[in-house]
Image: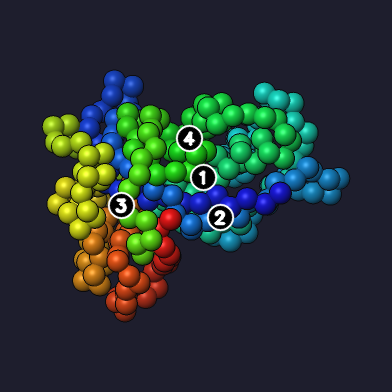
Amino acid sequence: MIFFPNAKINLGLFITEKRADGYHNLESVFYPIAWSDILEIKEQGPTDPLFTTTGLAIDSGYRENLCYRAYQMMRRAYDLPPVAFHLHKIIPAGAGLGGGSSDGAFTLKGLNELFEIGLDKTRLRSMASELGSDCPFFIDNQPAFVWETGNQMETISLPIKNKHLVVVVPPLHIPTARAYQLVTPRKSRPGLKQIITDLHPKQWPDKANNDFEEPLAQEMPQLLAIKQGLYDSGALYASLSGSGSAIYGIFEEKPSLPDTFSGYRIWEGKLE
C-alpha cells in the first residue's frame, strides 16, 4: 500500500516556559499542507529489503527512522509479520515542516489499515505521542491549535482556505536542540489561538510571531532576507515554520517570486 505523508506549517509559535523536565511549553497552530513524501508498506517477501529510501538523503540509519520505530511499536503490540518499507523522501529535513513526524504517524495509520487492526484515532494518537510531540497531529491531519509540549491539541477552523502558499527552504539544516538553546520563553501576551482564529491573515504579522525566528535569523540572516522577499512579493503573512529553516508566505493569489530565491527549494500550492 502507498501513502503520502504530508508536511505542516506553524502559524505562529510562542515558547511560553521551560519545564522542570527540560522540555518547553508552547502555543502554535499546525496547518497541514500538500507537500508530501511517498511511503510504501507491504508484507516482506523473501528477497525484499527491510527499509529502502530514495529522494533526499536521510542522515540517520533506518533503526532511528520514525517509520521503523513505529513499525517496531506496532509489531510488539499486535504481533505483526515482517514488512518492507520504501520511503521516497521529498520534504526537506531540519526545515520545521514535520516531515519525519508525518512519516512516523502515517506508518502507524498505514499498518493499522494494511493489517486491519481496527485501532481508532484515540489509540493511534496515543501511540504517535510515544514517537514524538508532533506525531499525533498527523493522525487527524486537520488544522489544530496545539499547546503544552505540542501534545495537547484542538481542531480549529481558519479563514485561509484557498489562499496561495509559498514555502522557501534555503540549504540550511537547523538542529532542534540548537534552536531551543537560543530561544527565550515569554509567557505574558495574548493567546495565539485567538489571534489566528479571530483576525485576518494580514493582521497576523505584528501579533503571530514565531519565537525561534529572531534568534535564528541573528545567526542566519538569509532567513530574514527570504521573509522580506515574500512580503515584497505581496504576502499577507510570512514566517519561519517550526524551529527549522523553511520560511513561508500566504498570498491571495500566486505571486511572482524574486530571482534571489533561485537555488532554494520552493513548494507552492493552495491551502485546503
| Circle nearer the viewer, 3 or 4 | 3
Q: In the image, what residue type sits under mark 4?
A: Pro
Closest to the camera, between mark 1 and mark 3, is 3
First in sequence, mark 1 or 3: give its number.
1
Q: Where does label 3 land, which residue?
A: 159
Work out whether residue 127 can be spotted: no
Q: Which residue is mark 2?
A: 37
- Amino acid bearing label 2: Asp
- Real-space Cα separation, disc 3 to disc 4, in angstroms: 23 Å
First-in-chain label (2 vs 3): 2
Reading the chain from its start, which is encountered first: label 3 or label 4?
Answer: 4
Earlier in the chain: of badge 1 and badge 2, it is: 2
Residue drawn at 22 percent across, 66 percent down: 231
Which element is circle 4 on?
Answer: loop
Q: Which mark is residue 136?
A: 4
Given this view, does label 4 or label 2 mark the residue nearer the observer?
4
